Image (spheres, grey):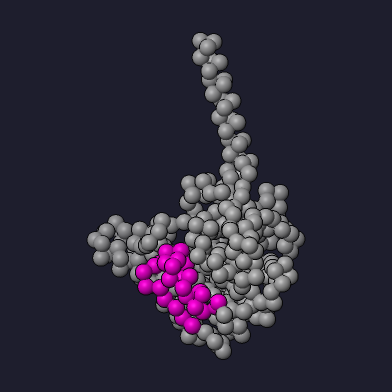
């Protein structure tokens, strides 16, 4: 009996040590090779709070791509390097965990004042920081999903800071978008003959049409509206835990930041439709959509695009992907980026 208790005691101690090691295991990012390359994972002080940066590229003199992640609260730092390797040949790619998200979530910080306006201020200050650090007058700004809501506001407020704006999975009028997504998901459920899904979706019809809720993302995922050519990367617990850039403590930060950001920010995107906030852009802008996107409606994005004034604009659709065309069709996206911006 004593021997058994002793074994259990040692086993418990080992488990505790493993958990502690996982919590505080050093994080890093794989080296990018090149004479003037950069591959850093670091926190910098931006607008009064420490925010996490992942900067990767083969030549620091290449144009800077500043990438604004979606969610709210879904940093792409844990898996970015796996999908942006081609871009790193011709661009210096900067990912950052937004205030209160992922590694930029701090347990002792008050986030009760978190708004998209504050995130926009952060983005503008980060832009200035990067322009000075890399001695580049203008930055190429890329926003994905919810990140396109924040990034479009930044490009509208300070067009002089940006060479161009690219909105991937571009946010638009969110109520209009959700109605489109509902209609498409319902059609897909009927086509598949899933009567229970049809019943559950129809029960949400009025709330969705009145902007009181969104189409449940498990249905959108089920019918291919999130990702078609890769596994859905956001929220992948195993992928986050096994990445070089995140440890167990960061995973906990990710989960807490996700819940908090969703609670504070999703409603704001409905209450203040982006077409009213950003009716035009003075910098060249491009909306990049996956044909099967069920997270941000292609139809609603095109409606917004057609309304927007701008000297140079383009609406681009990737034919085989859903909400992540930059990852699902990374070779085609890389070619489009270099063809459009390398000069």
Instruction: Provide residue 103's location: percent of width, then percent of height.
Output: 63, 52
- What is the span of residues highlighted in magenta in the rendered image? 314-342
Q: Is residue 316 magenta?
A: yes
Q: As displayed, is residue 18 above or below residue 71?
A: above
Kindly identify the residue that appears in the image at 61 percent across and 50 percent down.
28
Q: Quarter-wise, where is residue 262 in the image?
A: bottom right
Q: Is residue 172 magenta?
A: no
Q: How many marks?
A: 0
Kindly identify the residue that appears in the image at 74 percent across and 59 percent down.
45
Instruction: Check the image and name the residue furthest to the top.
Output: 1
Kindly identify the residue that appears in the image at 58 percent across and 35 percent down.
19
Instruction: Provide residue 245's location: percent of width, then percent of height.
Output: 58, 51
Q: As displayed, is residue 19 above or below residue 279?
A: above
Instruction: Provide residue 177's location: percent of width, then percent of height.
Output: 45, 72
Q: As displayed, is residue 195 above or below residue 183?
A: above
Instruction: Check the image and name the residue furthest to the right.
Output: 48
Kindly identify the residue that appears in the image at 60 percent across and 83 percent down.
283
Q: Quarter-wise, where is residue 137 in the image?
A: bottom right
Instruction: Provide residue 51's location: percent of width, then percent of height.
Output: 68, 58
Between residue 236 and residue 186, name the one nearer to us.
236
Q: Looking at the rendering, in which quadrant would you find the C terminus?
A: bottom right
Answer left or right for 39 relative to 336: right
Answer left or right for 137 relative to 145: right
Residue 120 seen in this snapshot: no
Between residue 213 and residue 232, name the one nearer to us.
232
Between residue 105 and residue 39, name the one nearer to us.
39
Between residue 256 and residue 86, name the one nearer to us.
86
Q: As displayed, is residue 105 above or below residue 214?
A: above
Residue 10 seen in this snapshot: yes
Instruction: Check the image and name the residue furthest to the bottom.
Output: 311
């Amino acid at each position: 009996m004593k021997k058994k208790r002793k074994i259990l005691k040692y086993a418990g101690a080992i488990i505790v040590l493993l958990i502690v090691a996982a919590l505080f295991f050093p994080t890093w990012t794989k080296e990018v090779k090149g004479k003037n390359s950069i591959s850093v994972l670091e926190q910098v002080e931006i607008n009064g709070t420490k925010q996490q940066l992942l900067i990767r590229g083969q030549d620091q003199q290449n144009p800077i791509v500043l990438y604004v992640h979606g969610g709210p609260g879904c940093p792409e730092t844990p898996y970015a390097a796996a999908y942006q390797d081609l871009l790193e040949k011709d661009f210096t790619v900067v990912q950052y965990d937004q205030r209160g998200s992922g590694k930029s979530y701090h347990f002792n910080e008050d986030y009760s004042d978190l708004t998209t306006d504050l995130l926009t201020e952060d983005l503008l200050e980060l832009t200035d920081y990067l322009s000075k650090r890399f001695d580049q007058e203008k930055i190429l700004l890329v926003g994905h999903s919810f990140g396109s809501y924040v990034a479009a506001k930044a490009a509208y407020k300070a067009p002089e800071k940006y060479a161009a704006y690219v909105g991937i999975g571009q946010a638009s009028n969110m109520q209009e978008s959700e109605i489109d997504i509902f209609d498409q998901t319902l059609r897909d459920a009927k086509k598949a003959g899933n009567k229970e899904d049809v019943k559950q979706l129809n029960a949400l019809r009025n709330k969705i049409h009145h902007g009181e809720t969104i189409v449940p993302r498990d249905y959108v995922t089920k019918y291919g509206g999130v990702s078609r050519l890769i596994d859905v990367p956001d929220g992948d617990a195993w992928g986050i835990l096994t990445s070089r850039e995140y440890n167990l403590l960061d995973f906990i930060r990710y989960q807490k930041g996700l819940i908090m950001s969703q609670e504070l920010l999703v409603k704001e995107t409905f209450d203040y439709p982006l077409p009213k906030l950003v009716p035009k852009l003075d910098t060249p802008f491009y909306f990049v959509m996956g044909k099967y996107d069920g997270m941000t409606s292609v139809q609603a994005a095109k409606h917004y695009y057609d309304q927007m004034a701008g000297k140079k604009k383009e609406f681009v659709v990737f034919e085989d992907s859903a909400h992540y065309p930059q990852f699902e069709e990374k070779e085609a996206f890389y070619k489009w980026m270099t063809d459009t911006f390398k000069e």
